[in-house]
């Protein structure tokens, strides 16, 4: 009974935000893609993520035609790399986001995005984060969602704007009609608060 | 363990993919040396995933899924993908036989190769050499800087933002001590005089949006020499 109610609540929140709950469903679909090459599962992931990946790319200034092309490439990569998805490291949404992000960077630079390699012999100091110490990707996502919810609305909004802005934040300054310095200091405050909130959430 | 870290803003911009290539390289190299910042940057990737899922969907081509489905198991694509994956796993094939220098974390090695000696080092002043990595768009310059142990650099300011990542050795100035893995960002309000640690040469990755501005008489002389 309690479970039914919880599921009901889940469906309600799904309707409200238009976003399905993180975690299990996408995990299951992606696992089906990885293990049994399930095209129906892929189609469901595609229906949710493809229009949002394209939206993300266009928001960053990629024109519609190229955004469509890069989105298709990103979704094909989701199919081909499904077996490398590790739910301990990231949620499905996060994983697909990084694929789309790297597609865009590759298209801009024709070079690989610099990323640290955990097996790098040049690493020194602290040992790399072990698999056991890592929180599951879905859990990290849950905490980040809660931290965002707990932030004052205008700080959350600023972070959302800044995330899809370039590093100069001049777009935000233009939109909010605030001096650039003010935008930067407010963003610093908002991120500091997000970080502290995130660390307080258990 | 690093004592000086990039700002939360830079970690977020790195995760979002909006940093310039030189700054992305500097941050990635720091992350390779700093598990704490690596974790924080993963939090921002998580944020990216959440924001992506919350974006209003845009219209995609109506036959899009039908176009994509036949491409999924396209053999040429799979082969290219397997190759790319092998490259990611074992690092890009390199044609230089020199052994990889252990001082260089992998993101940096991917850009400059593994052999420091093969870089186009230029003399700047006694005890200080720089190599331009030819990365990024002007006025930004990406350079490695090698400074002799014990050297005191002339006092200088900055005409624009400059980010420094220490790869070997270390230095001290009015703001504290920096060693391997530390990131120091100086904006035009910062004037400092760095003294290199006495026991080891210092190697730094420097991403600067403008030249330094030397102060004092020695500075005036070096400014002239610095036509490089």
Image: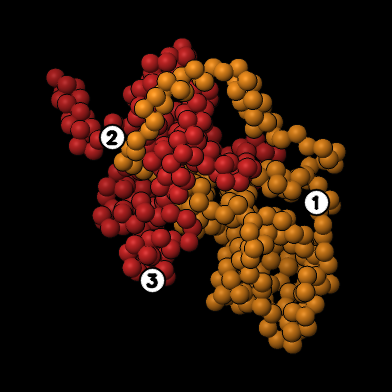
Chain colours: A red, B orange
| Residue indicated by mark 1 | B116
Q: Secondary structure at mark 3?
A: loop
Task: Looking at the picture, tell me which residue is in the foreground, B43 or A100.
Answer: A100
Same chain letter for marks 2 and 1: no
Residue found 42% across the figure and 15% down from its top: A39
For residue B213, what is the image quadrant? bottom right
Residue found 77% across the figure and 63% down from its top: B130
Residue A61 image point, x, y percent: 45, 49
Residue B157 image point, x, y percent: 63, 77
Same chain letter for marks 1 and 3: no
Q: How many marks?
A: 3
Name the subunit of mark 2.
A
Residue B26 image point, x, y percent: 62, 54
The answer to whether residue B50 of the structure is visible from this angle is no
For residue A50, what is the image quadrant? top left
Observer-side mark, 2 or 1, equals 2
| Residue indicated by mark 2 | A19
Task: Looking at the picture, tell me which residue is in the foreground, A149 or A125.
Answer: A149
| Residue indicated by mark 3 | A179
Q: Find the distance from the CA under tag 2 to the CA under tag 1.
A: 50 Å
Name the subunit of mark 1.
B
Observer-side mark, 1 or 3, equals 3
The quarter of the picture where the C terminus of chain B appears is bottom right
Q: Is residue B74 above or below residue A58?
A: above
Q: Is residue B198 left or right of residue B188?
A: right
For residue A174, what is the image quadrant? bottom left
Residue found 73% across the figure and 55% down from its top: B133
Q: Is residue A36 left or right of residue B128?
A: left
Q: Is residue B107 above or below residue B170?
A: above
Q: Is residue B212 above or below residue A161?
A: below
Residue B197 image point, x, y percent: 73, 66
Q: Secondary structure at mark 2?
A: loop
């Amino acid at each position: 009974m309690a479970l039914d109610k919880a599921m009901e609540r889940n469906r309600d929140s799904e309707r409200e935000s238009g976003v399905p709950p993180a975690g299990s469903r996408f995990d299951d679909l992606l696992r089906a893609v990885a293990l049994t090459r399930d095209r129906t599962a892929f189609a469901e992931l595609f229906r949710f993520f493809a229009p949002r990946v394209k939206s993300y790319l266009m928001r960053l200034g990629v024109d519609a035609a190229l955004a469509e092309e890069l989105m298709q490439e990103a979704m094909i990569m989701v199919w081909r790399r499904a077996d490398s998805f590790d739910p301990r490291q990231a949620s499905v949404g996060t994983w697909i986001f990084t694929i789309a992000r790297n597609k865009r960077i590759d298209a801009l630079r024709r070079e690989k995005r610099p990323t640290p390699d955990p097996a790098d012999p040049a690493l020194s100091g602290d040992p790399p984060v072990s698999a056991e110490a890592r929180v599951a990707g879905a859990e990290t996502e849950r905490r980040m969602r809660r931290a965002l919810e707990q932030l004052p609305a205008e700080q959350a909004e600023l972070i959302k704007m800044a995330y899809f802005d370039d590093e100069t934040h001049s777009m935000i300054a233009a939109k909010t009609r605030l001096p650039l310095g003010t935008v930067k200091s407010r963003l610093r405050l908002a991120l500091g608060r997000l970080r502290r909130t995130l660390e307080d959430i258990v | 363990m690093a004592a000086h870290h990039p700002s939360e803003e830079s970690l977020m911009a790195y995760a979002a993919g909006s940093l310039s290539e030189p700054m992305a390289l500097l941050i990635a190299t720091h992350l390779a040396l700093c598990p704490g910042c690596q974790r924080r940057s993963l939090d921002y990737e998580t944020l990216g995933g959440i924001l992506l899922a919350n974006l209003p969907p845009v219209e995609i081509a109506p036959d899009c899924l039908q176009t994509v489905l036949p491409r999924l198991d396209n053999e040429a694509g799979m082969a290219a993908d397997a190759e790319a994956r092998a490259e990611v796993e074992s690092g890009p094939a390199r044609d230089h036989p020199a052994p990889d220098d252990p001082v260089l974390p992998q993101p940096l090695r991917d850009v400059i190769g593994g052999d420091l000696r093969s870089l186009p080092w230029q003399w700047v002043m006694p005890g200080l050499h720089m190599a331009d990595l030819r990365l990024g768009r002007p006025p930004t310059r990406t350079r490695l800087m090698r400074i002799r142990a014990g050297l005191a650099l002339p006092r200088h300011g900055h005409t624009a933002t400059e980010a420094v990542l220490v790869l070997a050795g270390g230095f001290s100035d009015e703001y504290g001590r920096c060693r391997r893995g530390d990131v120091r960002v100086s904006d035009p309000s910062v004037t400092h005089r760095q003294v290199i640690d006495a026991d080891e040469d210092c190697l730094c990755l420097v991403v600067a949006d403008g030249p330094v501005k030397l102060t004092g008489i020695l500075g005036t002389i070096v400014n002239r020499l610095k036509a490089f």
